[in-house]
Amino acid sequence: MTFHSFRRAHPNVAILGATGAVGVELIRCLEARDFPLSRLKLLASPRSAGRTLSFRGEALTVDAVDAASFDDVDLALFSAGASQSREWAPRAVAAGAVVVDNSSAFRMDPATPLVVPEVNPETIGAHRGVIANPNCVAIIAVVPIHPLQQAFGLTRIRMATYQAASGAGAAAMEELRAGTAAYLAGEAFTPQVLKHPYAFNLFSHDSAVDEESGYNGEELKVVAETQRLLGRPNLPVGITSVRVPVLRAHTIALTLKFPEPVSPEAAREALSGAPGVRIVDDRAGNHFPMPSESQGQGDVLAGRFRRDLADPTGRSICLMVSGDQLLKGAALNAVQIAEQLFCPQQLRSSAPATEPVA
């Protein structure tokens, strides 16, 4: 079997990490988008085995992943962390599956395509069994940046990211809920998942800080992956990543510099109708992209187009974007990659709205 010749038109699909926040959304996306699979297998660590999750009205039991888990699997969607991906992805590929991996394990491997279907779908065909799903912030950023780069060129990116609890998983989301309840009740609360109190607070992203550069791991990942996705390895990208007390959906303040002057109106027009982008830009109503409206749906919201007052040449534009980290930033992007592999004629850029994780 080659990696481009699948055993069946309607693939057998496995999800590794099915009980996590992204795993749950993978199940919902496959169902909402009517992905043409024959059978769905749910996999997780032994401690999560035995749980049941619903798919198309059927209760599916979660199995503990083992050496035989990927036998007769055509497509494996991984969302269980980098160490699990490094252990199980080679085994899944050896069994004949294509792996779409949501961890950081393979993202910067030159032999592994790093894919956002609205941006670089042509790279999918070069896979050798594994396709990497990018970092959530990088995905949400490049969906609107790519059409602007195509229209005007691009010489620099600056971004400040406001990242929700969903980026740290279901446990962080629950800690935000519990910490908020304790705060409002005037009770003491000691965080266990994140390093700092989360309720009514914000702090620098909790990934480890590089002593030499001063940038944290999240920021360095976003820079490298944004450059790779845009095909610009030397593109200057500056970033500050902040964790904010929002349950899900990340927001990014962008400042983009172009080779020639670009008006806010031209930038907005270039994004109107761009795949995966929805304009939310009401100056009179002071209504711009925000996580309460980007969560639970698949588009990246873009708005607040304006000139950068710090650049008198008129070549820099500021805007805000917001996208659901669990959907377009993770599960939806992975399912769109799978659609490109198995049913490209059915590819859609955004998913039907889903209910936020309870």
Image (spheres, rainbow, N blue to C red):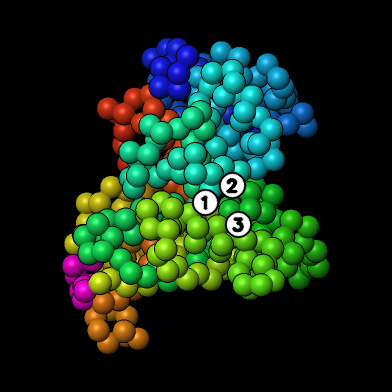
Give the image quarter of residue 196: bottom right
**How far across and how far down the image is residue 282, in percent?**
27, 69
Q: Are marks 2 and 3 in contact (CB under 8 Å)?
A: no
In screen coordinates, is 98 left or right of 245?
left
If you read the primary sequence from the N terminus, does the residue marked by circle 2 or circle 3 appear first? 2
| Residue in view at x 30 percent, y 66 percent | 154
Quick one: label 3, few (<14), some, or many (20+) residues within 10 Å? Answer: many
| Residue in view at x 60 percent, y 24 percent | 92
**How far across and how far down the image is residue 294, in percent?**
42, 54
Quick one: label 1, few (<14), some, or many (20+) residues within 10 Å? Answer: many
| Residue in view at x 57 percent, y 24 percent | 93
In screen coordinates, is 319 left or right of 226?
left
In screen coordinates, is 51 left or right of 34?
right
Q: Nearer the viewer, residue 124 or 103?
A: 124
If you read the primary sequence from the N terminus, does the residue marked by circle 2 or circle 1 appear first? 2
If you read the primary sequence from the N terminus, does the residue marked by circle 1 or circle 3 appear first? 1
Give the image quarter of residue 180: bottom right
Q: The disc labelled 2 sits on which kind of residue?
A: Ser
Q: Which mark is residue 165?
A: 3
Secondary element type, mark 1: loop
Q: Is residue 295 visible?
A: no
| Residue in view at x 61 percent, y 43 percent | 105
As measured in the structure, the alpha-carbon distance from the residue carrying label 2 to the one carrying label 3 is: 18 Å
Q: Which residue is mark 2?
A: 104
Q: Which residues are magenta?
A: 260-268
Q: Is residue 153 magenta?
A: no
Q: Which mark is residue 317?
A: none
Q: Which mark is residue 135?
A: 1
Secondary element type, mark 2: loop
Quick one: label 2, few (<14), some, or many (20+) residues within 10 Å? Answer: some
143 lies above or below 216: above
